[in-house]
Amino acid sequence: MNPPAPNRLSSLTIWTISTPAAAYGALAVLLSIYLPPYYASHLGMGAAGVAGVFFIVRLIDIGVDPVLGVAMDHTTTRFGRYRAWLMLGAPVMMVSVWLAIMPPTNASVAYMVAVLLLLYIGLSIIMLAHTAWAATVAPAYDDRSRMFAVLSVAGVVGTAALLVLPPAMHIKSSADPRLIQAMGWFVIVSTPFGIAWAALRIPEKVTASLVRDRTSLREYWDLLRRPEVLRVVGADLCLGLGPGWMTALYLYNSEDAKGFTSAQASSLLLVYVAASVVGALLMSRIAVRFGKHQTLIASNAGYSLGLICIFFMPPRQFVLFAGFMAIMGFLGVGFTILVRAMLADVADKIRLETGKQQIGLLYSLITLTAKLASAFAIVFTFRLLPVVGFDPKLGVHNSPAAILGLQLIFLIGPIVFVMLGGACFIGYRLDARAHADIRKALDERDALAELSPELSGVGGLSTAPPPATPITG
């Protein structure tokens, strides 16, 4: 059992700071599930064209997140550090979403690449700033599990709001322009409201780095070589790629392979996200009892075993699939919650050993892996569809062999990647007790810095503080 945490963060603070997650949670669904089929069918880009566009965007965008992370870590304003960037990202995301949902009928590849690139930059700013800010507001080991559980719930609320639109609007096709535009406008409207509610009510305490030199390329690679960083970032990539792989093909598998209508497919997704709300709240409690990485390993194993069952389920059995989606939603939500909570603990360890506040840079690695996972999921899956003879265009009748190929692609990739993600934490040692020692040393040093900057090394009057006893990953 983990040691009790003093000064438990209030639930009101956690729920207030979590409100911006609803907007970008909704946007994640729009980007990963609905926009690719919409561009492939309505704009006539085809599966290969969509895969190419997303690959180009990710290739250009790959270096944005680390640059943003470094910039955020070195920002100091009267509005705070990460909170200021969160407010800055709102207009960027709002404009780019509008451009993405209202493309001209003859939109070129260059147009789509530019729009999606701007959209992903805006999403990066908001997600990175919000995640880093939340981690600094909740410094305790168990509070971070609670914080990221509630962030996940807020994201699920945004997801659910989008998924009720197809049945509410009586829309049969997931590629209907009216549906895509309605989803986009939800994101556009909810973004400023969620950010304003959190930013105006929760202050940010800026913790200064003891070492004020800029992060060099060498230090960046030194950060990536740390065992605990490699474990968490590698796991996040695998755990994003697995479910993201399924997400990219979800509508095709549900409608073409399992015989559900678009409304039924959306309803099944609602079951998934509803179960993930319950899973988020319970998973954080389980993590408090057994530890974050042990809980994550167990949820990985259950998720992978559950995926095998879907191949043997008969088509058009809504109740059966609803039960399956509930189990998957309960288990899958732990991936995001626990990985992000563990990365905040890693950031504390690095700050104690180096004297540098690099939580923005660290979380930029997570936003980068999340975007890489979503993009590569689309690239890989949409490139594999023609290989098995599956055509995603509207009105095309696919052969039984093509449908079987679709189902195999839908399942094999996620099973492999999710199992790899869980394996990353075998032997992980940064648990609650180790983190409690780290936080105690940090709190003592921060208190000393406030009383006497000269003694603590602030302002460059001394070199980095003596390193703490290493805790290997």
Image (cartoon, grey):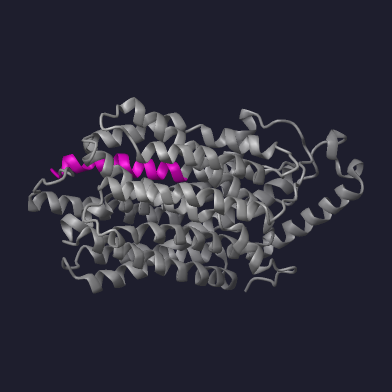
Please name whichever residue, 246 or 31, is drawn nearer the observer in this view of the structure: 31
How many numbered marks are there? 0
Say which quarter of the image contains residue 313: bottom left
- The residue under the point 37% across, 30% down is 113
Chief secondary structure of the magenta span? helix
Please name whichever residue, 359 or 92, is drawn nearer the observer in this view of the structure: 92
Q: Is residue 389 left or right of residue 108?
A: left
Q: Is residue 330 visible?
A: no
The location of residue 344, given as percent across then percent down, is: 62, 53
208 relative to 108, above or below:
below
Q: Is residue 386 visible?
A: yes
The location of residue 97, given as percent across then percent down, is: 43, 41
Please name whichever residue, 298 or 389, is drawn nearer the observer in this view of the structure: 389
423 relative to 366, above or below:
below
354 relative to 266, above or below:
above
Residue 299 falls inside the magenta stretch: no
Say which quarter of the image contains residue 384: top left
265 relative to 69, above or below:
below
Residue 382 falls inside the magenta stretch: yes
Image quarter (top left, top right, bottom left or bottom right) of the N terminus: bottom right
- The residue under the point 64% across, 71% down is 2
- The residue under the point 67% across, 32% down is 215
The location of residue 440, given as percent across then percent down, is: 77, 59
Q: Is residue 275 left or right of residue 368?
A: left
The location of residue 259, given as percent across then percent down, is: 16, 61
Q: Which residues, given as a range, are shown in magenta? A: 370-390
